[in-house]
């Protein structure tokens, strides 16, 4: 299970990096479009269409990584006061609700991606930009999240049975900062 978890983490991190690149692309493209429109009276052709598609990459590319780090938003008013078994039970409930919701989203996302490819769906505008890549990204990102949720159900069930505290993995992007603050303490 550790090998699968590590593989999933590396894949999710890769997709997160691609999403980050998409965010940078959108940022620079948006800036160029504003400068071009306001300064030179000439917008960047296709900026809106490309930005719309990269939004899907940014959001759905980060979902699985957020789940791996257990950094999705939750109300911790009750959660922090519970013993490890209570926390594990709530984590399992959240994982199962996530599986239900994102399972339905994946099902429809796959249908939409297939239909989009069949009809050659593209944006309207100066540049016809195909929409099926964004729909495929939605399905892939959701599929990664579902794989992680299944793994989390298994891990959280183990914590429920043996009563151990779940460990939240340290984000490699912040590992150095955490080490430095621990050394100062």
Image (spheres, rainbow, N blue to C red):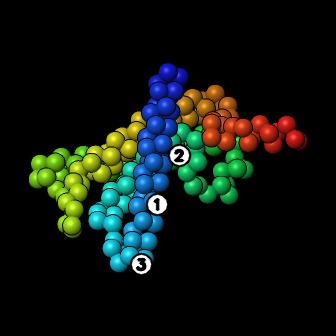
Which residue lies at the image location 16% right of the left edge and 48% below the top edge? 117
Q: Is residue 78 visible?
A: yes
Decide which of tag 2 and tag 1 comes sooner along the chain: 1
Classify mark 3: helix, strand or loop.
helix
**Dot 2 alpha-carbon crowd within 10 angstroms: few under 14, some 14 to 19, many 20 or more:** some
Which residue is labeled 1 in the image? 27
For the residues carrying marks 1 and 3, which lies nearer the camera in this image? 3
Which dot marks residue 38?
Answer: 3
**Compared to 108, does 13 lie above or below?**
above
Which residue lies at the image location 44% right of the left edge and 33% below the top edge? 11
Classify mark 1: helix, strand or loop.
helix
Which dot marks residue 66?
Answer: 2
Question: Which one is nearer the viewer's eye here, 53 or 102?
Answer: 53
Give the quadrant of residue 29: bottom left
Cα separation, mark 2 vs mark 1, equals 22 Å
The location of residue 169, given as percent across then percent down, is 63, 36
Classify mark 2: helix, strand or loop.
helix
Cα separation, mark 3 vs mark 2, equals 37 Å
Q: Is residue 45 left or right of residue 173?
A: left
Which residue lies at the image location 33% right of the left edge and 71% below the top edge? 43
Q: Is residue 142 left or right of residue 184?
A: left
């Amino acid at each position: 299970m550790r090998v699968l978890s590590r593989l999933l983490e590396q894949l999710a991190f890769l997709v997160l990096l691609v999403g980050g690149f998409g965010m940078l692309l959108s940022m620079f493209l948006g800036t160029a479009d504003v400068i071009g429109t306001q300064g030179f009276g000439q917008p960047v052709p296709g900026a809106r269409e490309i930005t719309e598609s990269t939004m899907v990459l940014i959001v759905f590319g980060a979902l699985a990584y957020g789940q791996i780090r257990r950094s999705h938003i939750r109300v911790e008013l009750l959660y922090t006061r519970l013993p490890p078994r209570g926390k594990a039970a709530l984590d399992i409930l959240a994982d199962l609700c996530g599986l239900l919701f994102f399972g339905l989203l994946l099902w429809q996302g796959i249908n939409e991606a297939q239909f989009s490819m069949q009809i050659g769906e593209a944006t309207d505008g100066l540049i016809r930009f195909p929409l099926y890549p964004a729909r495929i990204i939605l399905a892939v990102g959701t599929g990664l999240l579902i794989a992680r949720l299944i793994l989390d159900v298994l891990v959280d069930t183990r914590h429920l049975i043996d009563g151990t505290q779940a460990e939240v993995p340290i984000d490699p992007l912040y590992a150095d900062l955490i080490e430095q603050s621990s050394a100062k303490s």
